[in-house]
Image: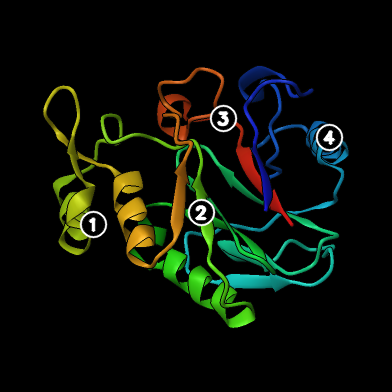
């Protein structure tokens, strides 16, 4: 498995999307996004399959590059010809790989509750039973992800390790801690590269900025 996490820097987008925005759905100039994506493809040496992410639990298996982005929150492939991307601006970009397949998974609060990570693991092990390595990329940290009591209770009831507090003592969620525990309990090796998107100025953060671009986690065999 080879992978990369992009930052907001090094592209052509301007204004609120400065500068390596990879998302076409946020109001950026479509041609700038197309060129940003092309630059990334040249750098990694593979065409990249993106998806239309909807905070669900659907995983699409990719056998060839698709003209229309599949509506899903996870992509899996066994081909060495294609890289997979998950776009984020606070949610967790989860990248998975074993001997014969890789996956890019969008794990936000709803994705965690919907157990999308477990769905992805199951689909990968159906392809190849070899051990899986997971890489968790930049995401909002537990100190910054303030939530309502209703949302806090919904998540913590299912994932007690997600409970957190902001610096001012209000309710918050640490999705990374919960996801890491879930993966480790499945026998998955976890590499944690989770810089906080809110605290790191070179990353896009929807919670911090509202109108903003999207960085990506990209994975390939």
Q: Are the residues at dot 2 and dot 3 in contact (C-beta closer than 8 Å)?
A: no
Instruction: Give the mark, 2 or 4, whose residue is nearer the N terminus.
Output: 4
Residue at the limit of the structure toward the bottom, as seen here: 126
Q: Secondary structure at mark 1?
A: helix
User: Which x, y percent locates residue 165?
Assistant: 16, 34
Mark 2: few/some/many CA within 10 Å (<14, 14-19, 20+):
many
The disc, 2 or 3, on the residue closer to the chain's N-terminal end is: 2
Q: CA distance from mark 2 to mark 4?
A: 22 Å
The residue pinned by badge 1 equals 155
Residue drawn 47% across the image and 73% down it: 119
Label 2 element class? strand
Kindly report which numbered mark, 2 or 4, lies closer to the viewer in this rendering: 2
Q: Which of the two discs, 4 and 1, labels the residue nearer the N terminus?
A: 4
**Where is residue 66 drawn, in percent x and y?**
82, 65
Which of the numbered marks, if any, corresponds to residue 134?
Answer: 2
Where residue 184 appears, x then y in whole percent?
A: 36, 59
Q: Are marks 2 and 4 in contact (CB under 8 Å)?
A: no
- Give the residue displayed 57% in from the left and 30% down from the top: 212
Q: Which tag is nearer the camera, tag 1 or tag 2? A: 2
Residue that badge 3 annotates: 212
Badge number at residue 43 = 4
Q: Which is nearer the N-term, disc 1 or disc 3?
A: 1
Give neighbour class at mark 4: few <14, some 14-19, many 20+ (Cα, 10 Å).
few
């Amino acid at each position: 498995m080879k992978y990369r996490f992009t930052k907001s820097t090094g592209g052509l987008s301007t204004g609120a999307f400065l500068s390596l925005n990879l998302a076409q759905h946020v109001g950026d100039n479509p041609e700038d996004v197309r060129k940003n994506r092309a630059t990334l493809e040249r750098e990694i040496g593979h065409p990249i399959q993106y998806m239309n992410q909807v905070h669900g639990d659907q995983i699409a298996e990719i056998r060839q590059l698709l003209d229309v982005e599949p509506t899903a929150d996870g992509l899996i492939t066994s081909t060495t010809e294609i890289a997979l991307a998950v776009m984020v601006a606070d949610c967790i970009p989860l990248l998975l790989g074993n001997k014969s397949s890789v996956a890019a998974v969008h794990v936000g609060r709803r994705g965690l509750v919907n157990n999308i990570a477990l769905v992805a693991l199951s689909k990968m092990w159906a392809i190849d039973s070899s051990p899986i390595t997971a890489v968790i990329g930049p995401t909002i940290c537990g100190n910054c992800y303030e939530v309502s009591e209703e949302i806090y209770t919904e998540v913590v009831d299912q994932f007690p390790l997600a409970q957190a507090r902001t610096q001012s003592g209000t309710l918050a969620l640490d999705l990374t801690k919960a996801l890491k525990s879930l993966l480790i309990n499945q026998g998955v090796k976890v590499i944690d590269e989770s810089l906080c998107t809110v605290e790191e100025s070179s990353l896009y953060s929807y919670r911090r900025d509202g109108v903003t671009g999207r960085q990506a986690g990209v994975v390939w065999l």
